[in-house]
Amino acid sequence: MQDYGMQEVAIQQGGHLEDAAAVYARRRFEGGSARHLAAMARFPASRRLELAPLRYLLPQGRSCLFDLFAGTGFASASIRSEFRGTFLLEPHVAAEDASIANSRRHRACALSAGSFDGLPAADLAVCLAGFHHVLGPGPAADRDSHRRQRLEALRLWGSRLAPSGRLVIADVPLAGTDVGWLSGDPSGLLPTEPSAGAAGDEAPLADALRRRGIEDYLAALTARCDELDLGQPEPSAFFDHVVAEQSPYGHVACFDSPQELADMFREAGYEHVRAFVAPTPWLFPSKADAVWFVRELLGIGQPCDRPSALKTAEVDSLGTDIRTHLDLRQVSEGVWAVAWKLMYVMGERP
Ligand SMILES: C[S@@+](CC[C@H](N)C(=O)[O-])C[C@H]1O[C@@H](n2cnc3c(N)ncnc32)[C@H](O)[C@@H]1O
């Protein structure tokens, strides 16, 4: 097994790095990234249900994995051991993680073709919570300009995949998107049971997580989240109405529906496109932990270094905002959940 070792490669300044969207993203993430890292470091497993669907989407080839818009490398963490080598593409210095085997942090803009020079073709490229930041140079509301930029990104990433390599984009869907299977028949292409790298035994959701096949998994998890009253979160509304208004770094983003994104995949030349929306609640030991994590991960209000330093009024105030757009409730003994959902769109290079 080849070990790529940990190396840093100089930031690539070519391509799109200097255009308006990239400069915006860079500033925003420079401001908020320390808080994002601190949140992920304190509760590294709270978002683990976002990773569970990836176990159903792995390709046959397992040589090289790209983690695009990698942040701490969270998206690739649970599947990295299945691949010979992993490259984390992320322009900002993130938590150095020398313990990650077979991976290399590539300090680079994932939207710049030059960033991929010298890297092997990928069997799988994953982009978690990054695509809504791929914006065109027009004003914030210019969806056509954003769409053109996104198509370009999809084409670039497709050109860096091995034959039959897969791209998976996992992101917040446009408001109003229901959970469930949306596009393409899973049979004959996706594994009928999840690969290794299980998300763990999540007491209140464990039965759903043991299900075979992605449709079965989705149906069971959706039913369980409905029972727990975690059924109808709108993360995009939370970004638009809470993060954008209460973050010192602002929040400019464009959210797609899974259908729109699946169409873009096809237009960019991908085959066997599959799209679905999964409930992905975040789990915490207490209400204050949950509120603190949301606040620091998304850069809301002023930085706060630990949950116990939050005032009761601050917990209650953001807790109310979370309940309005997402949900926040105790789902079992010692487990609090923030309701969340993500769309997953997967396509293959012919
Ligand atoms: C919302 S975070 C998601 C991080 C990680 N994927 C996760 O889910 O925890 C978005 C990340 O994208 C990075 N980013 C922003 N623009 C980028 C670009 N052009 N190329 C690569 N990464 C970028 C940011 O620095 C930030 O770490």
Image: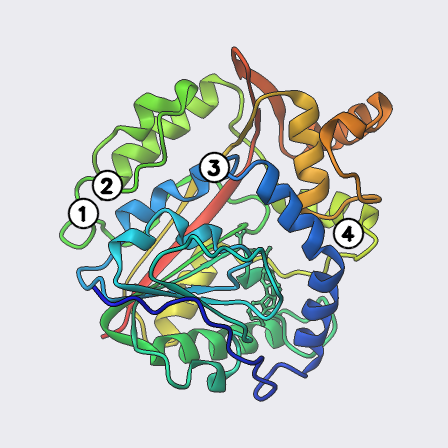
Label 3 sits on residue: 280
Calculate the distance from the C-alpha at mark 2 to the C-alpha at mark 3. Answer: 16 Å
Calculate the distance from the C-alpha at mark 2 to the C-alpha at mark 1. Answer: 7 Å
Mark closest to the chain's N terminus, 1 or 4: 1
Q: Between residues 173 and 84, which one lies in front from this camera angle?
A: 84
Residue found at the very far top of the displayed protein = 333
Label 3's element?
loop
Instruction: Answer above or below: position of 258 versus 92.
Output: above
* Res 197 → quadrant: top left
* Left/right of residue 313 with respect to residue 286 in the rendered view: right
- Look at label 2 and name its amino acid: Pro
Mark closest to the chain's N terminus, 1 or 3: 1
Label 1 sits on residue: 191
User: The C terminus is located in which quarter?
Assistant: bottom left
Answer whether labels 4 and 2 touch (C-beta < 8 Å).
no
Calculate the distance from the C-alpha at mark 4 to the C-alpha at mark 2. Answer: 36 Å
